[in-house]
Image (cartoon, rainbow, N blue to C red):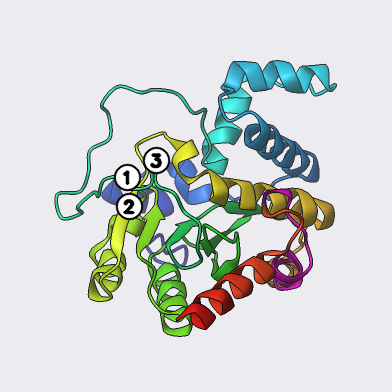
Amino acid sequence: MINRTHDLPVVRQCQLLVLSRSTAYYQPTPVSAAVLALMRRIDELHRDHPFAGARMLRDLLRREGHSIGRRHLSTLMSRMGIEAVYRKPHTSQRHPAHKVYPYLLRQLEITRPNHVWAADIPDIPMQRGFVYVFAVLDWASRRVLAWRQSNTLTTDFCTEAVQETVTTYGAPTIFNTDQGCQFTSLEFTGILNAHGIQISMDGIGCWRDNVLVERLWKSIKYEEVYLHAYESVGAAQQGLERYLPFYNRQRPHKALDGKTPDQVYCDNLTTRLTAA
């Protein structure tokens, strides 16, 4: 926008564009390693205590020896896209073209694979910045059926994963997500409607409605992400490609009586096919 080689002075160009001169001369600086380490610890505390706001997180960090003020902490939380879970006034304005569906899982007994699938998009911290991951989880077996990574919060990488999952495993009865704009978009819901899948969405601020997916992200972050501090997007991709097969095939789950997600998913499908 600003042409430094133009005959017109930069000052005059800023006046014509109604820009501050500081905007034209500003040079971005990388985030320091200390701040990135602090952001990672904030992310860990938020995952353990989602109800904690800036003041409580500040006090928790100070007990660990971090010197940080509430305003600085609020700025970092805003940059990371996290906030405390609490009941809010009616402030969210939904897009008029995006339909929001009711929550269908309350008091629903889910005992077989492909009955309910769930999905979500968390941020994965790296040494410099974050990437986003979308995953489709089978509710009964905890098996990750498909996933995609992206450095932007678009809808396309979500729809690609859903289409791959339906093509590979068939359509579930119910698909549950939160009310994020990626999931309420016509592109996303159109795929589910085209396959006759019932759409379920969490209530606003009700993270417990999709608790199994939240538990998956906690496992991924504590057992893989925080141990490696990825240097690049490619390293994050390789780390998840290494961890998720382990999660599906080798990692025992207490809720599954010590079995792996693959065992529960495949055994139940085999039993149903034999009975048929």
In the foreground, 106 or 222:
106
Q: Is residue 236 visible?
A: yes
Near mark 2 (Cα within 10 A), the count class, few <14, some 14-19 or many ≥20, is many
Cα distance in 3D space between marks 2 and 3: 13 Å
Say whether residue 98 is left or right of residue 87: left
Q: Is residue 8 visible?
A: no
In terms of image quadrants, where is residue 124?
A: bottom right
The amino acid type, in three-letter code, at marker 1 is: Tyr
In terms of image quadrants, where is residue 115?
A: bottom left
Q: N-terminal of the two: label 2 or label 1?
A: 1
Q: Which residue is mark 3?
A: 107
Q: Secondary structure at mark 1?
A: loop
Q: Position of residue 27 (x, y in %)?
A: 59, 51
The amino acid type, in three-letter code, at marker 2 is: Ser
Say whether residue 192 is left or right of residue 251: left
User: Above or below — where is 3 with respect to 245?
Assistant: above
Q: Secondary structure at mark 2?
A: strand
Say whether residue 30 is left or right of residue 169: right
Q: Position of residue 274 (x, y in %)?
A: 53, 82
Residue under the image location 78 percent in, 18 percent down: 62
Give the number of the mark in front: 1 or 3. Answer: 3
Was residue 254 drawn as part of the magenta stretch in this picture? Answer: yes
Residue range of the region highlighted in magenta in the rendering: 240-255
Q: Which residue is mark 2?
A: 200
Tell whether label 1 touches label 2 (CB within 8 Å): yes
